[in-house]
Each structure stands twice: as C-alpha cells, then as structure tokens.
Amino acid sequence: MEKLFDVLIIGGGPIGLACGVEAQKQGLDYLILEKGALTNSIYNYPVNMTFFSTSDRLEMAGIPFMSIGNKPTRTEALEYYRRIYFYFKLKVNLYEAVQTLENKGDFFQVSTSKGIYRSKKIVLATGFYDLPNLMNVPGEELPKVLHYYKEPWPFIAQKVLVVGGANSAVDAALETWRKGAEVSMVLLEDEVDENVKYWVRPDIMNRIKEGSIKAFTRSRVKEIKPNEVTISTPEGDVTIDNDWVLAMTGYKPNFALLNQLGVELSLDEKRQPCYDQANQESNVPGVYLAGVVCGGLNTREFFIENSLVHAESIMKDIANKLKS
Ligand SMILES: Cc1cc2nc3c(=O)[nH]c(=O)nc-3n(C[C@H](O)[C@H](O)[C@H](O)COP(=O)(O)OP(=O)(O)OC[C@H]3O[C@@H](n4cnc5c(N)ncnc54)[C@H](O)[C@@H]3O)c2cc1C
C-alpha cells in the first residue's frame, strides 16, 4: 500500500511552490509534482522577457526578491524560485507529469509518468501555459508556425508574421524587427491591445505608424503555405511572402485534469472552474485550485501577484480540516 500524503500539489510554478511553503508551515505531509523543470512555464517564457510586476510584488514567504531593475527579468525570476526551492528544501518531484486523477472516496489516487500516489487532498496549480489557442486555419501544422517565441536570432533576415496584439506578440514583433527581420502583424482590432506594457506600447505604435512594421488591422490569418500566408482584411484577402508565423494567440488551461475529478466549469465563455473564494476549494470536496488556472479561459484575471494569497488560504483550510 502506497503512503497516504496529506496533500499533493500538481504544478511546480510560482503558486505551486508557494503552496509547498505554506504546507510546510502548517506541518502537512505534502509533495509537489511538476511535469518539467522547476517553474517550467517561466523557463519556457521568451529569453529576454521582463515581468510587468515589480520584484517586491512577486515576493513570497518574506524572502526578498532582488532584481537589478524595478521589474525582474526571466533569469532573475528563475534564480529567485531556485533560491526558494533550496531555502525551504521544498519537496518537488521534477519531470514527473500527472496523467490521471481519481477520486476514490476516502482518498485521491494520482497516476504520473513515474508512479502512483495517494493523498487526502489535492491542489491543482497547473497554470495555463501548456496549451496554445490555435488559429484553426489550414497550414497551422507547418513547422514554420510557432506558438512559443524564445528569442530573435533564428529570424534574422526572415519574413516574419506575428499574429496577435498582446504583450507576447508585441515583444516578439519588436525583438525580431530589431534583429533585422521583415515583420508584419495581424491584429484583430484597430491597434495593439490597450493593456500592452505601458512602456512598450508607444514603441510598437510608432514602428507601425512609420511603416517599419506592417500591421494588418481588423484582420485574421486565413491560410498558411510553406512560402506565403493569406490574410483576410477588411479590403479583401491579401497574400504575402512568408518564412515564419509567430502565433502569439494566447494559451488556455488544460481542463482535462479538472474534468477527471468532476470540477465544474462555468457555462459562459470564461469556462471558469467552480470554487469557493474563501478557501479555494472546488465543488469537489478536497480538491483545491491555486494560481492562474482559477481564471479559466480568462487568463488575465489571475497572475502571480494576486494568486500568492491562494497558498495560505488553501493550506490553512486543509490543516484545519485534517485536524477536525
Ligand atoms: C510572458 C508572460 C509574462 C508574465 N508576467 C507576469 C508579471 O509580470 N507578473 C505576474 O504576476 N504574472 C505574470 N505573468 C503571469 C504569470 O507568469 C503566471 O501568472 C504564473 O506563471 C502563474 O503561476 P502558476 O503557478 O499559477 O502557473 P504556472 O507558472 O504556469 O505553473 C504551472 C505549472 O504546472 C505544471 N504542470 C502543468 N500540467 C501538469 C501536469 N499534468 N503534471 C505536472 N505538472 C504540470 C507546468 O509545467 C507549470 O510548471 C506572465 C505570464 C506570461 C506568459
């Protein structure tokens, strides 16, 4: 018979780690299961990205977050979470993906790529960065279509189409253009999103205005071929030469694990999981939700800053319930 944990935390992102710290504080027997590297989503962010939050607002458990500028870089964040991991000696199994979750009544059974675990409670802190929103157009499966952007070097002297108007799209467009790519953008609206980082927005607006970056506004990609892309614009279809498509169309949570346990999703377009905001417990007793997964398809509702509080409320609730 396998050991029975008090709580298994699925996902070793910032919020999963915060849950681990709080579980430790409450004296709970816990384990974090992470399918990739420590803070795997942040590891996979663009290499040169800068957070929009100042580092003090991302601090957890009273541990100072040092960064050279006000806003930390990806590397500084990776270093911060590495320090948190070693400082608290967190129990994390890395490169172990959770595949199925079963509610066995008295306990939950968790099957991973490496084994089977049993636990009294479950915390889902699985984020949203694993599943890109697809454009669902012919040619999307071509290898030149990328849903994750890392750095500009592969795109020197290449014809790049960036799809989307939010932060990731704008960062990718500006970086690749500055390294000598010929960049076009496809925007659903008249201009890039209003909530693009306030210190970056004027830069992209000016590049578009001066014609350095060509923006197809109120447009969408219609078809992708190996050497060209067809775009539906208000003036009709336009076909342009193209080497790469950077589809920065956002990401969505993987609802499969939630479904396996019977966590309900709202019926509106947000598909927000059902949970009690007082303690983060879902409609399934013993199953808790933490971090950005709580927003469902509204992936901007929760971020690190406003999700860190989930960890404390969850672990206090679990400790109280296991005591009684
Ligand atoms: C480019 C970018 C910039 C951002 N900037 C900021 C910012 O400045 N400030 C801010 O507060 N937020 C920011 N965010 C949002 C922030 O990064 C996320 O809110 C944060 O990563 C959420 O933490 P999380 O722990 O909820 O989810 P994640 O960090 O996504 O962690 C989830 C973890 O779960 C793991 N996982 C998923 N499925 C499984 C499975 N089946 N088995 C095991 N493990 C699994 C994943 O590998 C991942 O490591 C930014 C996001 C992006 C994309």
Image (cartoon, rainbow, N blue to C red):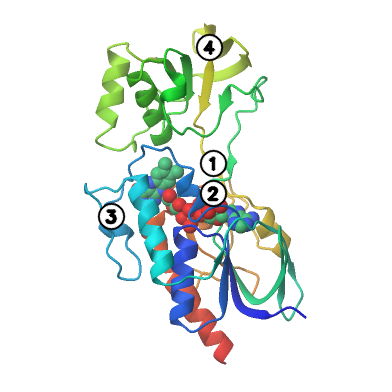
Q: Nearer the viewer, residue 106 or 79?
A: 79
Mark 1 and mark 2 in contact? Answer it, CB < 8 Å.
Answer: yes
Q: Position of residue 79 (x, y in %)?
A: 37, 54
Q: Position of residue 254 (x, y in %)?
A: 62, 50
Residue labelled with disc 4: 242
Q: CA distance from mark 2 to mark 3?
A: 22 Å
Q: Secondary structure at mark 3?
A: helix
- Does the numbered disc 2 mark a residue whose Cβ is under 8 Å from ligand 1? yes
Q: Secondary structure at mark 1?
A: strand
Nearest to N terminus: mark 1 or mark 3: 3
Q: Position of residue 232 (x, y in %)?
A: 55, 14
- Left or right of 197? Residue 2 is right
Residue labelled with disc 3: 55
Q: Nearer the viewer, mark 1 or mark 3?
A: 3
The residue type indicated by label 2 comes to Phe
The residue type indicated by label 1 comes to Tyr
Q: CA distance from mark 1 to mark 3?
A: 24 Å
Mark 4 and mark 1 in contact? Answer it, CB < 8 Å.
Answer: no
Q: CA distance from mark 2 to mark 4?
A: 29 Å
- Does the numbered disc 1 mark a residue whose Cβ is under 8 Å from ligand 1? yes
Nearest to N terminus: mark 2 or mark 4: 2
Q: Secondary structure at mark 4?
A: loop
Q: Residues within 10 Å of mark 3 (few under 14, many from 20)?
A: many
Q: Residues within 10 Å of mark 1 (few under 14, many from 20)?
A: some
Give the numbered dot on residue 128.
2
Q: Is residue 82 above or below residue 232?
A: below
Residue 301 visible, this orientation: no
Kindly identify the residue that appears in the image at 42 percent across and 67 percent down.
Answer: 86
Residue labelled with disc 1: 251
